[in-house]
Amino acid sequence: MGTPSAEQLRTAISGLMPEIIEELKAMVAIPSVAFPAFPSEPVLAMAQRAVDAFARYGVDAHLEEIPDGYPAVWAEIAGPPGAPTVLLYGHYDVQPAPADGWDSDPWVPTEKDGRIFGRGAADDKSGIAIHLATLAAFGGRPPVNITLVLEGEEETVSHLEAFVAAHPERFAADVMLVADMGNLTVGEPVLSTGLRGHVKAIVEVETLADPVHSGLFGGAAPDALMALIKLLATVAGDDGASAIPGISGFEWEGADYSEEMLRANAGVLDGVELVGSGPIASRLWSRPSISVLGIDAPSVDEGGNVLQPRARAVVAMRIPPGQDPDAAMDALVGFLEANVPWHAKVTVTPNKKSPPFSQGTDGTAFAAMREALAEAYGTEVGQVGSGGSIPLLDELRKASPDADFLLIGAEDAELSRIHGPNESVDVTEIEHMALAQALLLARLGDR
């Protein structure tokens, strides 16, 4: 039996969609939050649910133990002799879902206006659905070698990264197909070619031995919280852009991101100015940004009339593709240490470091995926970046340095609201992405 034609694949995936969406809904109903404080039973149940789903479409998947972490859903499918190897990646764990802000129960998949609402519907159980439909279109026997890896800890501290580093041969592939991204707008396909990295540090400022009366000593004795506030104010310029020196950046040359879309997607309040300057795509994808993610300080309701002896915060910087993360961490730590006021005692502790990622556009698989997306969607394909980070990509690149990385998915930037309330996915995006993947595998199998 030969490789199905493009029209046969389109027909097959269209016919599969009702049952694939039912599979997705069943997965969304499982609260697979892998954070340490959450129960393990739903996470393991979700992993087994994914194994069973692939088995229904002829794929012999199993749970692969990952030391100290949740298992990966794993499958290896042998293609014809000489065929290239494609690694399909996604993740089955999800973010927590506090009830505030949701219009429906986050663990009860709800269909409305062509979208499925629920935690993980987009990020990243839609990626699992894409891979499921892709392989189902070939009856579980695609024309290339497949390694399927669904991670269980992408949203928390990942143990898969160490597993890749310890067993790089198991992740060797010609193409890395990562279905954990998305288009800016439904129906307008893009390929992501760069992701910012992430460095975080915890800064603690100390000024006094103990809390003291703000009336008796205020005006002469230094308040640690005020010192911390003054220090944090130096990390950004007047326009809100990062003021940390020595961090590289460049102008984005692909698709732009309109101010109207940014305001809508981020929920910027009317009258509030955006930060930074220049093209928004550059601000989001190819320049550094700086944020204060948390402060330890007395609450408004519990604050007494005292000067604080110590205060601390976590400062995070997103770094653009091409920036060395070690140098970026050194720059952040050095800046915080050098700018604390009043010679206050300051301790800066590096907390987390994720490298940025970039993918060239001249690979054969990249070109083939561009063609496949154009055929699946019936329109031209854009090129975008991402402000977020996927640290695993760096380890996968070390395992397969010559592989083409194809970053796609059904998480549209306009309406998916990943990590927030009312997360959702457009079902047509799953269908189009699955068709594009299937067309790509057919093209690669014919080479």
Image (cartoon, grey):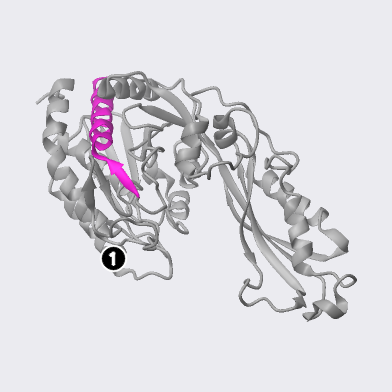
- Give the prevailing secondary structure in the magenta stretch: helix
| Horizontal side of residue 418 vs 431, given as left or right | right
The quarter of the displayed image where residue 144 is located: top left
- Three-letter code for the amino acid on which mark 1 is drawn: Pro
Which residue extends farthest right? Answer: 220
Image coordinates of residue 276 in percent, x first then y, are 65, 36
Image coordinates of residue 99 in percent, x first then y, are 36, 63
Residue 186 among those drawn in magenta: no
Q: Pointer 1: residues within 10 angstroms few (<14), some, or many (20+)?
A: some
Magenta stretch in the rendered image: 423-447
Whether residue 127 can be seen here: no
Residue drawn at point x = 14 percent, y = 24 percent: 4
Asked whether 177 or 83 is in front, the reply is 177
Residue 424 among those drawn in magenta: yes
- 161 lies above or below 306: above
Whether residue 105 can be seen here: yes
- 119 lies above or below 137: below
Residue that carries the numbered disc 1 in the rendered image: 42
The quarter of the displayed image where residue 190 is located: top left
| Horizontal side of residue 190 vs 157, given as left or right | left
Residue drawn at point x = 78 percent, y = 68 percent: 224
